[in-house]
Image (tube, rainbow, N blue to C red):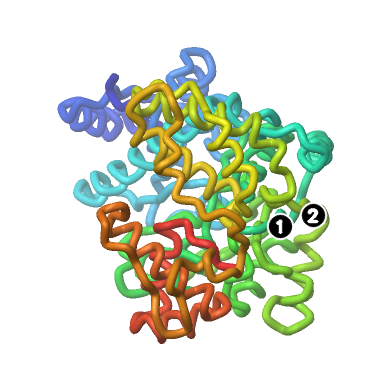
Amino acid sequence: MADKLLVIEHDADTGGGIARYYRKKGWQVEVATSVEKARHYLLEDELNPHVIIADLGLPDGNILDYLEELHQQIDYSEWVFAIAADGDTDMERIDELAYDFLEKPFDQRRLDKVLKRALRASQTTRRLQSYSAADTKRYQLDAYVGNSEAVRTLKDMLRRLAEVPISTMIITGETGTGKGLAARIIHHTGLRKNGPLVELNCAALPRDLIESELFGHEAGAFTGAKSRHRGLLEQADGGTLFLDEIGDMDIDLQTKLLKAIEDRRLRRLGSEREITVDAQIIAATGINLEQAAAEGRFREDLYHRLSVFCVTLPPLRERKDDLVEMLPSIVAEYNAKANKHVEIVPDEVWEKLLSYGWPGNVRELRNVIERCVLLSSGEEFPIRWLQLEENCTPGSAKAMGAGASRDTITIQLDGSMSLDAMDSHIIQTALQLNSYNIAETARVLGTTRETLRYRIQKYDLQTS
């Protein structure tokens, strides 16, 4: 299917020239010389173009006055406004609505670059929307598997949250309990399910990069900023912004986030104009934010602004009865992915699963099941690949790995662990031995905090 372009231009020669140029490049192009014709293409013919080049000086009105009506049909089109260099233009409104703007007469190379980027943005938005439709079916309440009392209480709370408008909320729980899953369920079952869901892991990026990702930037705002970037807050407008591991966000950046939440406005880096945004904020953390606020490690005012609603996820060790439902579901998932046929779970396997402490919670359970299914050779769940130690509990010597101490970590070189698994094990053990202090762990491993955070994110490691 050809990429679609609508040119709204009162001058027939200019519009026709643009149309001929881009038709040769494979675009499907339509030209409207008035607001009336533009409305016809967008509302009656349902053209649904990827990109719209719009001249503001039309004979029968200003296209800006019709955007609210038109946006109902073209949610996933990107606007590029053509403005006169010496004209009286409402630049604040254009800056809020447009992907970009160009002065007339057009510089063809500049127009090519802008349309290429606008097309990419439109295609990305459309793909995300199609994924979102599938996710809406995937992330229903039943996606949180279990029937224990703790899970029933949690689902009842999630069901209530789906029926009310949420401005901000916090999801707490140990690493691996499913905070991301809970956030997606809240979004896809809630009042904002038709809007975008945008996610950011605050522990995965350094402070300056998080600021740029969160608030966006203008071209030239800093070295390497070659074009305008819409921040994640702006991308989440009308939907949900999920901030995972918010406890790791730089405290100065927390101030800027608080202001954006309170005012529902933000300013891109390098911009003089503010942009209105309306997104619900879901923050997740594995630390006690109230305690962190009392100790000065987290802004107290931001904590109180976020904690309009607070949901705490139960650890797996407190709901082991749910393994009866979870195990078959996860086994079936990996059977389908790997074309395996595991159907029988011996009693000995159940005994080990039910007696284990599960310090990594559901994430650890999924990893264990994935390994066993992938290495299986028949219908029986292979006990040899469980690699669990009985009576293993968080914080014990066994949980950290045999032979672990303040100065040494022992790894069996018997082929049972891949290089990535060894790397992951070393980092996780070092974190535990250093009380999850990122700076100290980075020091003893001889690396930087940024590199350590990257590997923690890569391997989904426990950080508290």
Identified at 54% across, 48% down, the residue is 363
Q: Are the residues tagged 1 and 2 within 8 Å (C-beta)? A: yes
How many neighbours does mark 1 have within 10 angstroms: few (below 14), some (14-19), or many (20 or more)? many
Earlier in the chain: of badge 1 and badge 2, it is 1
Q: Quadrant of residue 394?
A: bottom right
Residue positioned most to the left = 24
x and y, in percent, of residue 98 in the image: 48, 47
Q: In the depicted view, which residue is nearer to us: 167 or 317?
A: 317
- What's under tag 2, amino acid-wise? Cys
Q: In the depicted view, which residue is nearer to us: 347 or 244?
A: 347
Residue positioned most to the front = 348
Identified at 58% across, 59% down, the residue is 392
Q: CA distance from mark 1 to mark 2?
A: 7 Å
Q: Is residue 242 above or below residue 304?
A: above
Quarter of the image with the C terminus is: bottom right
Q: Quadrant of residue 410?
A: bottom left
x and y, in percent, of residue 387 in the image: 44, 50
Q: Is residue 54 visible?
A: no
x and y, in percent, of residue 95 in the image: 51, 54
Q: Which residue is mark 2?
A: 310
Q: Which mark is residue 172?
A: 1
Q: SS for tag 2?
A: strand
Identified at 48% across, 17% down, the residue is 46
Does 22 sit left or right of 180 as displayed? left
Number of dots carrying numbers: 2
How many neighbours does mark 2 have within 10 angstroms: few (below 14), some (14-19), or many (20 or more)? some
Quarter of the image with the N terminus is: top left
Identified at 83% across, 36% down, the residue is 156
